Image (cartoon, rainbow, N blue to C red):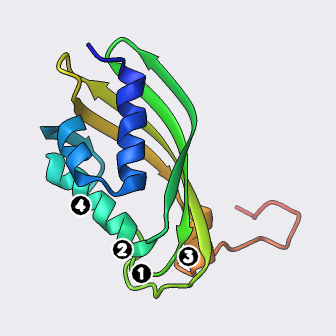
Amino acid sequence: MKKTKDIVVNLTNAFNDRNFTAIDILVAKDIKENRPGAGHGVEATKGFLMALQTAFPDFKTTINEIIGEADRVLVFTNTTGTHEGPFLFAPGIPPTGKVLSFQTADLYTIAENGTIVEHQDVIEIMEMLQKMGAIQFVTNSSSSPPSP
């Protein structure tokens, strides 16, 4: 089996290069995507890339940490880009023109043939959504705890 970490690095590079052909090679046609609303199959993976490049045409994902064991790879990433289009996690929010970033933790399962067969992620986008104006944080100016 190909080195599992190399496969995930190649997938990250394919996203950065907007290389749909490489995605077809690296990702199983019936990949199980474990993200609400993502759907399944390689078309769901490519759909996420298309949504990302629509919202952030200049986006780049950087791997901060990668750990591989047997058929599983855990990768922590940071994605940065200029908000120039609609973003699937903030529908209705107009482009801000701001350079924004978000972090993810992704867990991939790699099959014996070297394709990615399952993906799950945790996406940290709260700060980015705040900078977009999609959400607001309310701060409590009082130093005492709320009354029951």
- Give the x, y percent position of residue 99: 61, 72
- Give the x, y percent position of residue 117: 20, 31
Above or below, 37 relative to 99:
above
Closer to the chain start, of discs 2 and 4, is: 4
Q: Are the residues tagged 2 and 4 within 8 Å (C-beta)? A: no
Closer to the chain start, of discs 2 and 3, is: 2
Measure the alpha-carbon separation of dots 1 and 3. Answer: 17 Å
Circle on res. 46:
none
- Give the x, y percent position of residue 9: 43, 34
Q: Residue at x 27, y 24 (%)?
A: 110
Badge 1 element: loop
Q: Amino acid at mark 3?
A: Ile
Which quadrant is the N terminus positioned in? top left
Q: Are the residues tagged 1 and 3 within 8 Å (C-beta)? A: no
Circle on res. 47:
4
Q: Are the residues tagged 2 and 3 within 8 Å (C-beta)? A: no
Badge 4 element: helix
